[in-house]
Image: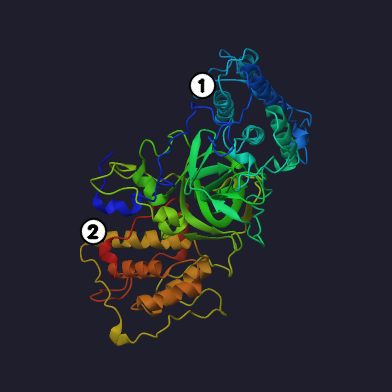
Amino acid sequence: MVEPTDTDKAWLGLCVGSGEVTQPSQMFQEANNTDTTDDGWLICRAKDTEQMHAMFAHILHFVRDVELRSVMAKIGEGDDGTRVLSDPLEECPDRADNPEYYEQIARPTSLQAITHRIVHCEYAMPALFEHDMLQLFSNACQWYGLGTDGYGEMTILQRLYNELTPSRGRLVDASGTRHGKGRLSDIDVVNSQHTKAKARALQRFASSPYGPGHEPPRPSKQPKIVPMDAVAFKGRNYHVGDWVHIMNPLDPSRPIVGQIFRLYKRMDKSGTFFTACWYYRPEQTHHTSSRLFADNEVVQTGVYGEHAIEDLLGDVLVLFHTTYQRARPAAGYWDKDTPVYMVEFKYDVATHEFFPIHSWASCVPASVREKVTYVFLTDPCPMDVFVQLAELPARHTSLLTQGDEVPGGRLLDDAIEEPVSEDMPDLFEGAPLLGEATQPLNIPTSVSSSVRPIMPPPAAAQTERLRAYAAFHAIASDLARRISPVAYNKLQHALADNPTASPVELGALALQLGGMSGAQVVHLRDAAVAAGMLPGQGNGALKSLPTSAAVFVAHHKGASFKQLPLETRAY
């Protein structure tokens, strides 16, 4: 790791979620029996240890009582509907038969071990009991792995457990009023919470029935709320901007990746709530079978869902792809065992289109953008910067191409609007477009030739020309995966007809074609001129470019995308 330069300040402050150190809430603190404080742990008013452990045993009874048929509307062939989801948690695997488990799981525990501690009244406070239960669910999810049935069943049990173990603040509304019966015993509180959860069993105990593929509608009326700066929950203090896993009722094996945009309490109901921006996994989107994704890639959506705080399953980290290559949060800003995701694109759930993210700051909450987390040379840097850029994860086709069925995901046909002949014309050579009925797309000529920008001269040295060509190839490949072959051909011929178009004209062209920005078209044109592929100031003989088919083939073979060199830009 190295000390970042002064120019790194702009992006460092936006890479650590909320910009707050992830200090855990205190497990050991003085007892406080008022409802005005909330330490995030299970509320317990028991006067003696035996009563407290009786409540713990009651919670375990409900966790052990969940059958598959109670949380699944349809039972698959070969599945036993009466199977109890908690069976795998009863005992740890035998060390001799399964040594891999103990190599992967650092702190093994089981329901039987926790039951033993309850019977012998070994828990001094509720937080210690909760710590063991959360460790139990964490071990199981780590062992099964994301996307498996076992992982999904463990998140269902964890969501039920979260409901059964409310803290003080989650039993009251924004005014501090309880909704329901008066003062209840600890066991009565657990029974009441179980009744609420049981009514939502078929949505896997989640507070909302929505998830990727079934997005929440816009509320017709906004409830009265009281914003909160931070919320303590199960050993963590959560802030606006934090990245989390959220219970997904449609597919518990794939929790929703989200960033918290608002924390609040409502006036009309008890509990603590948050609004999060959803990020979709590749298999939760509609895309063509040829589109490639990184192993841990997610895409930002415009979907914002309201959730109860009990829907939180754990912490994650989402990094913009440029930051993913450069740094990780420093110690204290994240747990190195949490999942790390990379994001590069936005996804429109209505049109099923992908768009590159040009400004990461516009994607995070306003309060995070305004927060100063790092002042050069005076504050400790919240990021550990790599000595050299890390490689981006390898890209592959999504799980949908392997026949997996995922809620929200669908494969689209690699539709081509017009037939593509095997003998493609060279780019920028003025050849007619594919299909006789299609006419070339002309670039608007609203800017007079007298004020047209002077194009950068082509690179003189062969090495510089190769660099310019590599830049062109990278941009062309990137555009080829975003737009159709027909649109790509229109772009080629438009640039060939008017290679000295201004940035304004190229921006208008980008809007007409869609799927690209004006800056990308400008960079593509400038790289082609610098490489001698298009006529420009001081240009020699016009060079033929690869066909659109060749660009697509190169992309599918994994052609690398290099950043456009500065000398090929027009500004």
Compared to residue 80, the image places residue 416 above or below, namely: below
| Residue 187 in the image, given as x and y percentages of width and height | 70, 27
| Residue 422 in the image, given as x and y percentages of width and height | 52, 65
Q: Which amino acid does label 2 sit on?
A: Thr
Quarter residue 533 falls in: bottom left
Q: At 74% across and 41% down in the image, what residue appears?
A: 202
Q: Which colour scheme is used?
A: rainbow
Binning the other alpha carbons within 10 Å of mark 2 as few (below 14), some (14 to 19) or many (20 upward) gives: few
Q: At 41% across and 50% down in the image, what residue appears?
A: 321
Determine which residue is flagged by label 2.
Answer: 463
Q: Which amino acid does label 1 sit on?
A: Arg
Q: What element carries label 2?
A: helix
| Residue 466 in the image, given as x and y percentages of width and height | 28, 60
| Residue 551 in the image, given as x and y percentages of width and height | 44, 60
Determine which residue is flagged by label 1.
Answer: 107
Quadrant for the C terminus, please.
bottom left
* Residue 526 visible in the current orientation: yes
